[in-house]
Amino acid sequence: MTMLTIENLHARVEGKAILKGLSLTVNPGEVHAIMGPNGAGKSTLGNVLAGREGFEVTEGSVTFMGQDLLAMEPEARAAAGVFLAFQYPVEIPGVNNTYFLRAAYNAQRKARGEAELDSMEFLKRVREKLKVMQLSPDLLNRAVNEGFSGGEKKRNEIFQMALLEPKLAILDETDSGLDIDALKQVAEGVNAQRDPSRAFLLITHYQRLLDYIEPDFVHVLADGRIVESGDKNLAHKLEEHGYAWVKDLGEPAGAA
Amino acid sequence: MTAERTDITATLRDNAEVAEALSRRYGAGFITDIETDSLPAGLNEDIVRALSALKEEPAWMTEWRLDAYRHWLTMPMPHWAKLKIAPIDFQAISYYAAPKNRPKSLDDVDPKLIEAYDKLGVPLHERARLAGVAVDAVFDSVSVGTTFRKELAEAGVIFCSMSEAIKEHPELVREYLGTVVPTGDNYFAALNSAVFSDGSFVFIPKGVRCPMELSTYFRINAGHTGQFERTLIIAEDGASVSYLEGCTAPMRDENQLHAAVVELVTLEKASIKYSTVQNWYPGDENGVGGIYNFVTKRGDCRGDDSKISWTQVETGSAVTWKYPSCVLRGDRSVGEFYSVALTNNMQQADTGTKMVHVGKDTRSKIISKGISAGRSSNAYRGLVKVEKGAEGARNYTQCDSLLIGKRCGAHTYPYMEVKNPSAIVEHEATTSKISDDQMFYCRSRGLDEENAVSMIVDGFCKQVFRELPMEFAVEAKKLLEVSLEGAVG
């Protein structure tokens, strides 16, 4: 069964058309990279899928696991299995990271009609996932993202993803601002979570992330549409030629 | 050191996540159907005498009240606070309401009263043992029962109603009453001194650490009455006590007046920790009804190395006018003020503290967290005063405001008077709002809007909640959640 079907998606931000007929199909187990120049609409796609307000869909549809995703509140999307790793993770002063995660985790379970975990059970899970991400346990006792370095914030996002076990993980420029060591750690965290039942959308400007996370499909987004799709070799082509040649592509290509 | 005064009026611009639609559930809004004895409405010398007579008070107490009343007549109602208050008709209020069938002991307490306190979660009977907190319950004008008296007496602690204290420990009451907040201190303190009906009295003798937390629960039940309680806590040399105070009232269309006075005295090396969770009925979303809360709370660190710490969580009342203060008279004495004040709908709060440094090397710390939602107005007003002789005095003030919605206001009025050049006075203030980014971040992780707001607010209040005794911290957190219900939509 198809996990995600985006058809002819048009979206506006502050009255300005950003997505102009984007179509994409994602199946369980697949890793799709969405690449494109600045302003192409990459982050808009992530935000529209996660349900951020201010991103107005004017045309098209998004079906996730047979449901109309666009009709759902952000928290319902999360419970259904959509996860967005933020480009700029948000600080929530005074709120303990573990407490936040447990509240989120249990809110999702509750929404799905599953039993909530008590703090002991939850902590056990946290410790297991912590090892995968090589995060220092003291991050758990700090406030959500408060005083985290750039790398810590991004790794914390991946850690949250590991804990929440989404069906569809959207990584919005998770590689931006990371040095090579942090990038590797993030990639390892993502790779550890690749699973036949889970799909990834990697939104990125640069090819280098794809050196560490090998995608099944690469799509080039330009001016609000997917203009080219291919396998990982497309990313290398982009790396060589830059985004300038994308503009020369005529008709938008179909989705994978 | 420069004195500074800032007035931050912050109004929110569009905040898509946090809308202004407001409604609220007030869980303590029930009325208990119980017969009461009350004095007719009105205030004059005869009423003051009648009140004193009803309470079988000694002549000195009656005179003390009359002095206060005469002083009150000469005073104008204060208008300096940032509050809009309809004129109060002091002649329309009854100054005394008491449940009939006054109980002789806890076992005689009317079951309806016990039921009322059960609904509020206040254990009056021996179940209180489980909670491990000694409770004095004040229903309208009188104390209806104090738990754990025997256990406390064994430790030498006196914990009883003020009425009893006047009869049974007159020497202590005469020595201390009105010495921290004099009868003519301010308009509402004068009124309270004239007509206070009951309250709690605590005396911790030399060297005694009070074996349990003490708690008073204030409940206004009768209509058209005011509540004027008076609390006096004395900790002798080396003594210490932690005292908790909770308040609720039924939902009524009228504004009811609550004008309390609390006096704390610490002698050498003594400490008092005073925590309040104030949840008087705040009025409805249109500002109809609710309690007018005019309270004078002051602690006097008389002895060297003594400490007074105020922690308050204020979520109720239509109007709050309250500045728990510390006079740091003893050398090296310490004053603290931790406050969370939340206003929603049409609520108005003007609250803060005064720290008066008199002794050498005195220290004070002020942590104030104001949360405004709906169309409410929330002001912090604080004075840090360092007297000439207060060599080496230090103060740290942190004053943060959080805005929810776009029609509320937050204001900060810090006053500083520093007369000793060696003093160090620090003030930090921030105003923020719950951002769309924070809301979306929480929601994208699965939290709904209300949970997201209460989590962010809880984080904002963390520094203050940490100071509360455990059970109170849990209650305070729940209270904020209920008070913010409907603040997002």
Image: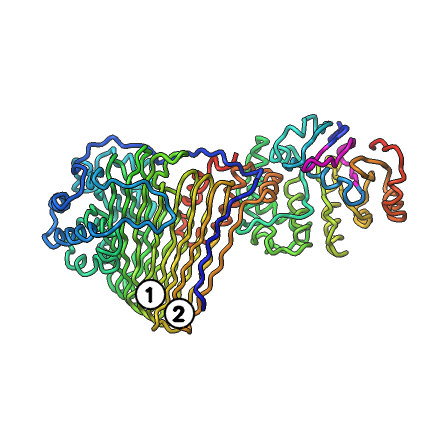
Label 2 amino acid?
A: Ala
User: Which x, y percent locates residue A236?
Assistant: 88, 46
Residue plotted at (32% across, 32% down): B253
Image-based side of B487 in relation to B127, left or right: right
Q: Is residue B219 above or below residue B63?
A: above
Residue plotted at (76% across, 53% down): A184
Q: Which residues are magenta?
A: A11-34
Q: Is residue B335 above or below residue B439?
A: below
Is the C-beta separation of discs 2 and 1 under 8 Å?
A: yes
Query: Does the stretch in magenta take in B454?
Result: no
**Residue A167 visible in image:** no
Label 1 amino acid?
A: Leu
B66 vs A201, nearest the viewer: B66
Please name the residue that numbered disc 2 is placed on. Answer: B393
User: Which x, y percent locates residue B25?
Assistant: 41, 34
Image-based side of A217 in relation to B335, left or right: right
Quadrant for residue B443, please give it.
top right
User: Which x, y percent locates residue A38?
Assistant: 78, 45
Q: Residues within 10 Å of mark 1 (few under 14, many from 20)?
A: many
Please name the residue that numbered disc 1 is placed on. Answer: B328
Tell me the CA gap for discs 2 and 1. Answer: 10 Å
Majority secondary structure of magenta residues: strand
**Residue B37 visible in image:** yes
